[in-house]
């Protein structure tokens, strides 16, 4: 019997003028590249934590890979923690915040994310990727942990 493992992932909430950067995942589950069933949803930049990297290093790496934006590691901070589960996957999701975004996003991985847009925090698109929803809810309510 295969032992299932818990993964560690993160989402980076990039805010500019009270708008959050979200990308739309491909509708094809194979291309959406999400073990948490995120095809067709809007999500913040993010990914899996790699061995040996800090949360902040992983956030800077993923934002660069997915959007082409070069963040300064000192501008990224941990703001949220959640426990995300579907029948086939379980991730601890670390939410990070960046308030200093020097560039506009580009679609760097068009097979995975089809577009990036800025959305008002009070008018978010649907469907929203559940781990991203939790990070935004935690931020707006001042809560750190959302199980």
Image (cartoon, rainbow, N blue to C red):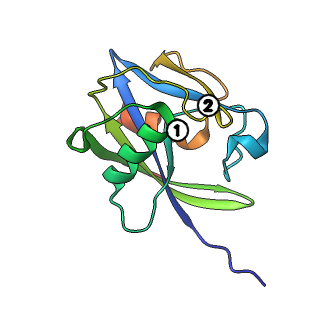
Residue contact between numbered discs 1 and 2, judged by CB atoms under 8 Å: yes
Give the residue displayed 36% in from the left and 25% down from the top.
15
Residue 143: in sight, yes or no? no
Neighbor class of circle 2 (other Cα within 10 Å; few <14, some 14-19, many 20+) is: some
Tell which of 117 and 89 is nearer to you: 117
Q: Quadrant of residue 31?
A: top right
- SS class of the residue under badge 2? loop
Neighbor class of circle 1 (other Cα within 10 Å; few <14, some 14-19, many 20+) is: many
Q: Residue furthest left?
A: 74
* Distance from the alpha carbon under mark 1 to that under mark 2: 7 Å
Residue 24 x, y percent position in the rendering: 63, 28
Per the image, the residue denoted by label 2 is: 128
- Residue 114 lies, with reference to residue 45, above or below; the image says above
Q: Say whether residue 62 is left or right of residue 24.
A: left
**Badge count:** 2
Tell which of 21 and 130 is nearer to you: 21
Residue 75: in sight, yes or no? yes
- Residue 132 lies, with reference to residue 20, above or below; the image says below
- Residue 84 lies, with reference to residue 21, above or below; the image says below
Number of the label disc, if any, that sits on residue 98: none
Number of the label disc, if any, that sits on residue 132: 1
Residue 93 x, y percent position in the rendering: 48, 53
Residue 40 x, y percent position in the rendering: 72, 31
- Residue 38 lies, with reference to residue 26, above or below; the image says below
């Amino acid at each position: 019997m295969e032992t299932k493992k818990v993964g560690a992932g993160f989402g980076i909430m990039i805010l500019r003028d009270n708008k959050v950067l979200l990308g739309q995942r491909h509708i094809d589950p194979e291309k959406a590249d999400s073990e948490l069933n995120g095809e067709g949803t809007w999500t913040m930049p993010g990914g899996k934590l790699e061995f040996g990297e800090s949360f902040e290093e992983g956030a800077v790496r993923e934002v660069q890979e997915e959007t082409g934006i070069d963040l300064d590691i000192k501008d990224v901070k941990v703001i949220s923690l959640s426990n995300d589960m579907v029948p086939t996957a379980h991730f601890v999701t670390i939410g990070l915040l960046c308030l200093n975004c020097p560039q506009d996003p580009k679609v760097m991985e068009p097979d995975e994310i089809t577009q990036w847009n800025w959305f008002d925090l009070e008018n978010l698109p649907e469907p929203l990727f559940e781990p991203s929803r939790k990070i935004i809810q935690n931020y707006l309510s001042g809560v750190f942990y959302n199980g």
